[in-house]
Amino acid sequence: MYRLNDKIKDLKPYDPVGERYRIHLDANESFLPIPAEVLEEVKADLDKLEFNRYPDPLAKEACEAFSGYYGVPVRNVVAGNGSDELITVIFTAFLQKGDAFATLEPDFSMYAFNGFLQEMRHVVIGKKEDFTLDIDRVIETCNNEGVKLLIFSNPCNPTSVVQSREEMRKLIRGVDALVILDEAYMDFGAESLLKEFMDYDNLILLRTCSKAFGMAALRLGFAVANDMLAGALRAVKSPYNVNSVTQKIGAAVLRRKEELQKALAEILNSRNFLLEQIKQIGGEFPNCFTVFGGSTNFVTLVLEEPERLYQYLGEQGISVRFTSGLIRVTCGTEEENREFLQVLLNYLKEKGE
Ligand SMILES: *Cc1c(COP(=O)(O)O)cnc(C)c1O
């Protein structure tokens, strides 16, 4: 009888939100749909697609649109089936048997998961109490442990903390490892290294269309790196990793810079409102929780008994993410934000009684 190996026999499918909820503030998606006029335009393009043919293996049109939006050379851009796929490709190809990789915890759980599946040695480096990095300690640990790959998100999911460009420069220059800098949320922040990726021989930047650009369903992410690293990524990824529909729609949306900026401003408004209101509630309930946010499309709550709040919200039909002992709340429509705030307020009132 066939048995699953020990590595995978107890794994469960990724399903952070088991049940259906009324309000979804759990996955950091955009609450805005792709503008109707953009979709209308794309439909004509889709009619011309040859579904019997494989997609463009280099997703040239989508990479060009990405390159146009951010002003980076197209030859340094590689498309993936979401940045999740790119993370997996990087783990499979840039590490060899027995190599060590490092993560900075708490951080995006897929990094550790990929390293686990590849059976690589995992070096866990903690953060300070305020979730910032001790850059010198990270550099020292990576180099002492012979780390070959360092991967982390900036701004960080789930803490929402952003580290400065200057600190990133020091870190990338200081380590011997290949650095995977996941800027999934940098459209909401202001410390991107996108304009200077060329200055490093050990940097791969990751970006995604799932958060700021409202295309989570399409699965489109990008890696940006120098010629050698971008070339290696193209050589090791599976040939037809981004499907034709995603390439077409992704390119059409990324070319609409003005609409994207408008949507981004709307998301930032929502985030600011949510953050300000939570801070206000914090003033009314001192010492009940700490809130982090300001560089992402979500806010992060640190509090005692986070699971209790998580469950309370769930019972009211609101799903948030409970991870690494933190409560992560994606900003939503104004109505969704208001409902969340009301339930948070109710929770704190009931708890105080
Ligand atoms: C959401 C997220 C991703 C995955 O993005 P996809 O492009 O949808 O795969 C990668 N990294 C971080 C930190 C994320 O939060």
Image (spheres, rainbow, N blue to C red):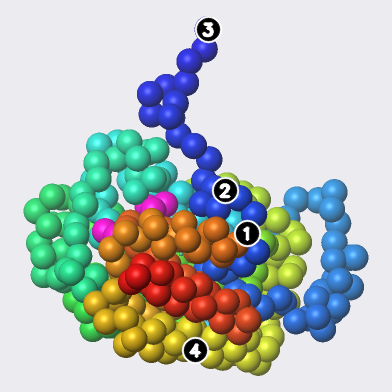
Q: Residue at x 86, y 71 (%)?
A: 43
Q: Who's the residue at 57% across and 48% down the image? A: 18
Which callout, 4 or 2, points at the residue further toward the start of the chain?
Answer: 2
Residue 273: mark in rendering? 4
Q: Position of residue 95 (x, y in %)?
A: 33, 45
- Residue 77 inside the magenta-drawn segment: no
Q: Amino acid at mark 1?
A: Tyr
Residue bearing the label numbered 1: 21
The three-letter code of the residue at mark 3 reads Met
Of the numbered discs 4 and 1, the one sitting upstream in the chain is: 1
Q: Secondary structure at mark 2?
A: loop
| Left or right of 142 on screen, residue 276 | right
Whichever of callouts 1 and 3 sits on the residue coming sooner in the sequence is 3
The span shown in magenta is: 105-111
Q: Nearer the viewer, mark 1 or mark 3?
A: 1
Query: Is the C terminus in the top left, top right, bottom left or bottom right quadrant?
Result: bottom left
Query: Can you name the residue that lies furthest to the front here?
Result: 353
Residue annotated with mark 3: 1
Residue drawn at the location 9% of the way across and 53% of the way down: 144
What secondary structure is found at the residue carrying circle 4? helix
Residue occupied by mark 2: 18
Distance from Cα at disc 3 to Cα at disc 4: 57 Å
User: Alpha-carbon distance for marks 2 and 1?
Assistant: 9 Å
Characterize the local packing of mark 2: few (<14), some (14-19) or many (20 or more) Cα atoms within 10 angstroms: few
Asked which secondary structure carries label 1, the reply is loop
Is residue 216 left or right of 183 when viewed as pictured?
right
Name the residue type under label 2.
Answer: Gly
Between the residue at mark 1 and the residue at mark 3, the CA separation in whole angstroms equals 40 Å
CA–CA distance between discs 4 and 1?
Answer: 22 Å
Element under label 3?
loop
Q: Going from the N terminus, do you reach mark 3 or mark 2 first?
A: 3
The x, y position of residue 152, in whole percent, is 33, 63
